[in-house]
Image (cartoon, grey):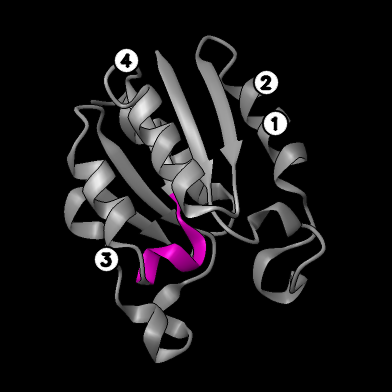
Amino acid sequence: MKILIINGPNLNLLGKREPEIYGSTSFEDYFETLKTKFSDLELYYFQSNIEGEIIDKIHEVGFDFDAILINAGGYTHTSVAISDAIAGVTTPVLEVHISNIYKREEFRHKSIITKECVGMISGLGLKGYELGIQFFLNQ
């Protein structure tokens, strides 16, 4: 099974950025943990602060991979283009958020991409990515 994790803007700062919200572990370190835990899977990771690069990556893998987990960061609430990219591919996509977006600022309560995803995990910290992988394994 081939699964891609896509993280959007500012998530390259995990482990440094607002540790009270996002924790103190970098995503690269956490990704190594995921690869060890799910050693029988082909796990890939992509992060970009650039909307077009995220769209290009969805297009690149969206017909060949078994699953995509996406944390679109701030683009979650603003990017019709990422939503359209998800709608345009056949690979199922699961939305993941480290923080509980419904306990944050009002503008974060609306996700433009959710309607194109098979589901959403929000507020469970980095564990949400592991649970997302588990979801696809159980399909």
In space, the residues marked 4 and 3 are separated at their CA atoms by 24 Å
User: Residue 92 location, x and y as percent?
Assistant: 25, 33
In space, the residues marked 3 and 1 are separated at their CA atoms by 30 Å
In space, the residues marked 4 and 1 are separated at their CA atoms by 24 Å
Residue 16 quadrant: bottom right
- Could you tell me if the residues under marks 4 and 2 are in contact, i.e. CB atoms within 8 Å? no
Q: Main secondary structure of the magenta part?
A: helix
In the image, residue 137 sits, relative to residue 79, either above or below, namely above
Give, as a three-letter code, the residue at label 4.
Answer: Asp
Instruction: Please tell me how crowded label 2 is: few (under 14), some (14-19), or many (20+) other residues with Cα within 10 Å.
Output: few
In space, the residues marked 2 and 3 are separated at their CA atoms by 33 Å
Q: Nearer the viewer, residue 35 or 84?
A: 84
Task: Name the residue that disc number 1 marks.
Answer: 33
In the image, residue 31 sits, relative to residue 138, either above or below, namely below
Earlier-in-chain disc, 4 versus 2: 2
Q: Nearer the viewer, mark 2 or mark 3?
A: 3
Task: Name the residue that disc number 4 marks.
Answer: 64
Task: Name the residue that disc number 3 marks.
Answer: 112
Q: Quadrant of the N terminus?
A: top left
User: Which region of the structure is painted magenta?
Assistant: 71-77
Give, as a three-letter code, the residue at label 2.
Answer: Thr
Instruction: Please tell me how crowded label 1 is: few (under 14), some (14-19), or many (20+) other residues with Cα within 10 Å.
Output: few
Task: Name the residue that disc number 2 marks.
Answer: 36
SS at mark 3? loop
Q: Is residue 81 left or right of residue 7?
A: left
Residue found at the far top of this picture: 40
